[in-house]
Image: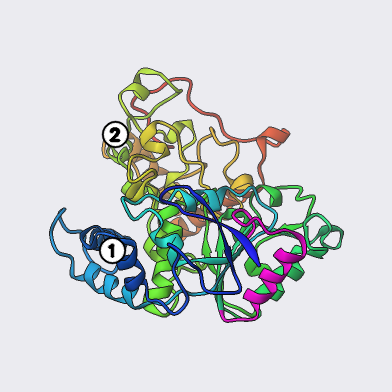
């Protein structure tokens, strides 16, 4: 069966047979990755440098200076070199292909096709020329073996699944069949995580995430709209080299990529602490690189690796480029975080330049609520719950209320 393949170093098109070992430059069945890289003439020093960076991303070891030896990177390289080509299925359900496009642009140097060779995919609609019966047979063949399953896109349950069908079957049926023999299941992107924009109110297609369908299986969530390519490849590399899923948070997100808030690693954090904020785009404060909180930045409520890994080979990320974070790695962000340019309802902590009067006012308010720590804690908890409710259900664009942003920038602190 002939399917379309792409050499990610030269962007040349190839046609190969998925029912027999790959020929030419592709990673052959039975061949270790080390043997494959040697045959391809990949520079070992370059490979070790890539492994050192990936080891840092996955939390396996500390960052080292360029050119220095990384014990964690060397250990990762040894495991990668011993690997034989796994079977991988990449389903694309109700989505826009942005997550797979992000993976294709995962940055590396002369080994640009390393991870994509590492996850040689027997079924991926975006890259395969096969269609109709040939494509169905490729999916059935891959599904019959132990494999890693990656899913982009939500699963629409409305109209008995008619909003998204593949080969005459609903997205739910296709997903359940593909997951039956999967060793690991990765829900890649906000759509696969919970439904993303399709699941935003009023959710006309009944879109939902993978973990809501495969309730009896562990699902690794890699959210984002789209996720950073290196985070996707990092998760796959972790599975193949460590032999188990990475430690995850309560939402099933790998802690090495989603274990800290953008706010905690933000290059503009010092301006937040100093109470220096942008009031509107291109004002004097914006040109000085002040904090974007007042123009809608959701970094204080968003867990992601954006400020650490960044995009385009560590070049930049939205906040560094002057645009507020929209919170796309968080569940229901299209409902909770909109309008995107409005201020979050509450952020814990105060800036270091808060005045004595402001601090005193907070203390007086707490005293009036009851003096005792228990009473104060109860009041604060109630206020946070109300704020949380407003953040979830308030949609100002539909005339349901919402906060205002300051008219100009300067030294203003969150209330």
The residue under the point 38% across, 60% down is 114
The residue under the point 43% across, 67% down is 118
Query: Quick one: which residue is furthest to the left in this view?
Result: 68
Q: In the displayed structure, would residue 415 be above or below residue 175? A: above
Give the class, few, some or many, for how many residues have Cα within 10 Å of label 1's Cα (few <14, many ≥20).
many
Q: Which stretch is magenta?
A: 124-146
**Residue 232: horizontal and vertical position, in percent?**
46, 59
Q: Earlier in the sequence, mark 2 or mark 1?
A: 1
Query: Quick one: which residue is furthest to the right in this view?
Result: 159
- Residue at image mark 2: 355
Of 245 and 368, nearer the camera is: 245
Query: Which mark is on residue 51?
Result: 1
The kind of secondary structure element at disc 2 is: loop
**Residue 26: horizontal and vertical position, in percent?**
45, 64
Marks 2 and 1, how far apart in space?
48 Å
Residue 373 in sight from this viewpoint:
no
Query: Which mark is on residue 234?
Result: none
Q: Is the Cβ of the residue at disc 2 closer than 8 Å to that at disc 1?
A: no
Give the class, few, some or many, for how many residues have Cα within 10 Å of label 2's Cα (few <14, many ≥20).
few
The verdict on residue 127 being magenta is yes
Residue 153 in sight from this viewpoint:
yes
Of 204 and 31, nearer the camera is: 31
């Amino acid at each position: 069966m002939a399917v379309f393949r792409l050499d990610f170093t030269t962007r040349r098109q190839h046609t190969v047979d998925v029912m027999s070992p790959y020929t030419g430059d592709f990673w052959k069945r039975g061949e270790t990755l080390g043997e494959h890289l040697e045959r391809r003439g990949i520079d070992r020093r370059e490979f070790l440098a890539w492994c050192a960076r990936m080891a840092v991303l996955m939390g396996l070891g500390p960052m080292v200076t360029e050119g220095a030896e990384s014990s964690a990177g060397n250990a990762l390289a040894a495991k990668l070199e011993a690997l034989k080509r796994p079977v991988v299925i990449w389903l694309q359900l109700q989505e826009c292909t942005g997550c797979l496009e992000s993976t294709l642009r995962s940055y590396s140097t002369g080994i640009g096709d390393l991870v994509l060779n590492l996850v040689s995919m027997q079924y991926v609609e975006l890259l395969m020329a096969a269609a109709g019966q040939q494509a169905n047979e490729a999916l059935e063949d891959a599904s019959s073996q132990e494999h890693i399953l990656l899913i982009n896109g939500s699963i629409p349950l409305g109209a008995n699944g008619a909003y998204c069908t593949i080969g005459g079957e609903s997205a739910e049926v296709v997903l359940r069949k593909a997951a039956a023999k999967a060793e690991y299941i990765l829900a890649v992107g906000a759509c696969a995580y919970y439904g993303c924009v399709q699941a935003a109110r009023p959710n006309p297609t009944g879109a939902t995430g993978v973990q809501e369908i495969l309730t009896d299986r562990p699902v690794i969530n890699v959210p984002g709209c789209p996720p950073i390519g290196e985070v996707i490849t990092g998760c796959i590399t972790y599975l193949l080299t460590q032999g188990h899923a990475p430690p995850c948070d309560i939402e099933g997100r790998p802690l090495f990529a989603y274990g800290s808030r953008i706010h905690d690693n933000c290059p503009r954090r010092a301006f937040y602490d100093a109470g220096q904020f942008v009031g509107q785009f291109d004002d004097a404060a914006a040109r000085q690189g002040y904090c974007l909180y007042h123009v809608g930045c959701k970094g204080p409520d968003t867990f992601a690796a954006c400020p650490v890994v960044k995009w385009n080979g560590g070049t930049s990320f939205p906040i560094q480029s002057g645009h507020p974070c929209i919170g796309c790695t968080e569940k229901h962000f299209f409902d909770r975080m909109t309008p995107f340019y409005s201020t979050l309802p509450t952020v814990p902590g105060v800036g270091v330049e808060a005045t004595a009067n402001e601090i005193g006012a907070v203390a007086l308010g707490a005293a009036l609520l009851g003096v005792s720590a228990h009473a104060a804690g109860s009041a604060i908890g109630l206020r946070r719950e109300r704020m949380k409710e407003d953040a979830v259900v308030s949609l100002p664009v539909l005339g349901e209320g919402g906060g205002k942003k300051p008219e100009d920038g300067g030294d203003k602190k969150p209330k």
